[in-house]
Image (cartoon, rainbow, N blue to C red):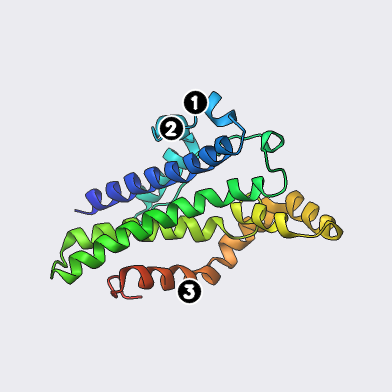
Amino acid sequence: MDSIFYLFQLIVLIFSIVIHEFSHGWMANYLGDPTAKYQGRLTLNPLPHIDPLGSILIPLLMFLSGTGVIFGWAKPVPYNPYNLKDQKRGPALVAAAGPLANLTVAVFFGIVVRILIAQGINSGIVVFLSFIILINIVLAVFNLVPIPPLDGSKLLFSVLPYSMRHFQEFLERNGVLILLFFIFFGLHLIFPVIFGLFRLLVGSNIFGF
């Protein structure tokens, strides 16, 4: 049963990440940049999006470690911001597309779970669907953290005044180190947002938070 559950987590994670990256590419293409389309990344087929480290090795190691949680990532969808029709808001719209897609998936399955619970169905299918919701909320909220290279940094930079360009350069230069520090020491800060959104969408204390 544990192996089936891990496999389910992995499949949900991969497809949720693919939806996330596809949405970036779709929005960029819609706004005038066909880079993702020309590189074969404007597709929901997982194969072009798979990153050997983030999509295979890291999830496999987490599975073997028995942590109970699987995490990973796909190859970022390439795009050229200079091709966008809206140079000012375009990068922010492309960045927002990924998290919004994940939230849309979470909302859809949240409605399904609420309907099932209202019909008195509170079996394993509700738990499995709830993990789809949770994984997509985690992806959305985590990617909205304003630290490069996460999507939230693009949204932050789109509203920062020119006078704060040095702060932007600092974040871009040290983003990876700051992100690692956040993952190890500050990840708990987004847990209330994740759990709050989950309770809002599901309307039931399924996982005890």
Q: Quadrant of residue 111?
A: bottom left
Q: Quadrant of residue 195?
A: bottom left
Using residue 158 as the reference point, say whether residue 43 is left or right of it: left
Using residue 170 as the reference point, say whether residue 42 is left or right of it: left
On the image, numbered disc 1 is attached to which residue? Answer: 40
**As shown in the figure, which amino acid type bears the numbered disc 1?**
Gly
Residue drawn at point x = 59 percent, y = 60 percent: 145
Q: How many marks?
A: 3
Q: Position of residue 185 (x, y in %)?
A: 59, 67
Other residues around mark 2 within 10 Å, as few (<14) / some (14–19) / many (≥20) = some
Task: Name the foreground residue: 4 vs 171.
Answer: 171
Q: Which mark is residue 192?
A: 3
Q: Which mark is residue 176?
A: none
**As shown in the figure, which amino acid type bears the numbered disc 2?**
Thr
Other residues around mark 3 within 10 Å, as few (<14) / some (14–19) / many (≥20) = few
Q: Which mark is residue 43?
A: 2
Callouts 1 and 2 close, C-beta under 8 Å: yes
Other residues around mark 1 within 10 Å, as few (<14) / some (14–19) / many (≥20) = few
Q: Quadrant of the C terminus?
A: bottom left
For marks 3 and 1 on the same chain, the one whose residue lies earlier in the sequence:
1
Using residue 73 as the reference point, say whether residue 13 is left or right of it: left
Q: Residue furthest left?
A: 120
Between the C-alphas of marks 1 and 2, the distance is 7 Å
Between the C-alphas of marks 3 and 1, the distance is 37 Å
Element type where label 3 sits in the image: helix
